[in-house]
Amino acid sequence: MSTRTIPVARDDRLEVDIEGLGDGPDGIARIGNYVILVPGVLPGERAYVRITSAARKFGRGELLAVRKAAPERVAARCPHFLACGGCHRQHQDYGAQLQDKQQRLQRAITWALGDEAPKVAPPIPAEPPFGQRHKVVVHLRNTRDERLEACFHRLRSPELVAVRECPASQPRAWAIAMAAVALLHELPHGAWDPDFAPNDLLRSVLVRTTMTGQAHVVLVARQPMIPGLERVLDDLHEAGATTISCNGNDGEFSRLLGPQTTIVSGPPRIEERLLETHYLLSPDTFFQTSPEGAEHLVRLVTEWLAPTSQDDVADLYCGGGLLTLPLARTARSALGIELRTATISDAEASARRNGLRNVQWRSGHVESWLRACRHGQLPRPHLVAIDPPRTGLEPVVIDELCLLRPRRIAYVSCEPRALQRDLQALATAGFRTRSVQPIDMFPQTAHIEAVAMLERST
């Protein structure tokens, strides 16, 4: 499409009909064949919008008014809805959110597997559909009267927007984060801004709470330590922090954490407990944001793989051992593979905490250690759990799985497009997808987690 045929221009105001939802925050409208993406709308609605960009392939619009509302439209609970980029489906009834996620995942699975595609199960809902995020990150900004205020990023922008509340966050985690911001204001440091305050120090506050009642507070600054922080440590502990750390980050505005985190006060790891398993977590170890959702995930994977005392299990991209440890409880042996050495240290500590001696951990690239399994240097797995990054599996990993030929695979995915591609490749490699169970780990958003259960068919 040439520039001359673009039917809208920036700042145009017009009414459009919303015909569907995209994979992210946007509703889809069309003028002829030209697509306009608008956040905050729902299929079947007629919306009055302002065009904010008009590129060659598609345009973007800002919702000004809903002329005709869809039946599933509800009032957004958060006053910052559509100002911050966090929860872009709060205007949709929760049951409709779940139905939309199931349908979107079904389209991806059917595209990948055709007539062999299983019917995607209804998503396991978040109960309740607010307060699920036990990890809270707020960015710091200076107000005109030189106070610190908590901010989130605006949708698709590095720009910060001040926030007073966050219904999506676990209430205790949010309260600790707000207390940390208030206490940092008592120190003689402002919030770093690359344009207006390039010499100031403070950047962000990260809080993670656990089901055991513990909490880790990470204070992010442009240097590894914050002068004078000892003055507020007792108050931070009183506010709920089990452990307090500092992270030095002098990098770009878009990067949350720097390479080194230093424990300032409290134990080096906080403890989480999901079902029967204890997990010890360092400040920058990846762990699921919703413990309630993580419990569903663990249950699904362990019930599908169902290892016995005759089975060797491998957990690929194992992180801190979320799946490895419960699988090891009934398996003959378990192998956890993770790229980051520091994360493996947490997994080893967690295995000791649970009294599990049949687990081996390896840091490095997954395909290298699978090759070691194939060559007899490590146990050859009968059962495999996979929880890859959002981008999915590298082809070489699928090649190794094809050569190892495990009996069953449990594939945990947070990205339907990557799952679609990988299930198709695994089908070609001789694995049949028996079922797909979504879990709503991020209610009020378009994000969906799913567990695909596969078994060797050849």
Image (cartoon, helix red, strand yellow):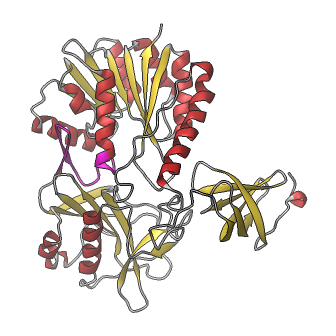
| Residue 296 drawn at (x, y percent) | 32, 39
Q: Nearer the viewer, residue 187 or 108?
A: 108
The residue sitting at the bottom extreme is 145
The residue sitting at the right extreme is 4
Q: Is residue 329 above or below residue 414?
A: above
Q: Which residue is painted at 33% across and 12% down in the image?
A: 375
| Residue 251 drawn at (x, y percent) | 42, 63
The residue sitting at the top extreme is 458
Q: Is residue 289 something one can see in this rendering?
A: yes
Q: Which residue is painted at 28% across and 27% down in the image?
A: 302
Q: Is residue 382 above or below residue 5?
A: above
- Asked whether, in this view, residue 172 is left or right of residue 452, the answer is left
Dividing the picture into quarters, in which one does residue 257 lie?
bottom left
Q: Which residue is painted at 22% across and 60% down in the image?
A: 216
The residue sitting at the front extreme is 71
Dividing the picture into quarters, in which one does residue 175 lie?
bottom left
Q: Is residue 319 something one can see in this rendering?
A: no
Boundaries of the magenta span? 271-292
Dividing the picture into quarters, in which one does residue 248 lie?
bottom left
| Residue 428 drawn at (x, y percent) | 56, 16
Is 186 magenta? The answer is no
- Asked whether, in this view, residue 30 is left or right of residue 305, the answer is right
- Asked whether, in this view, residue 73 is left or right of residue 369, the answer is right
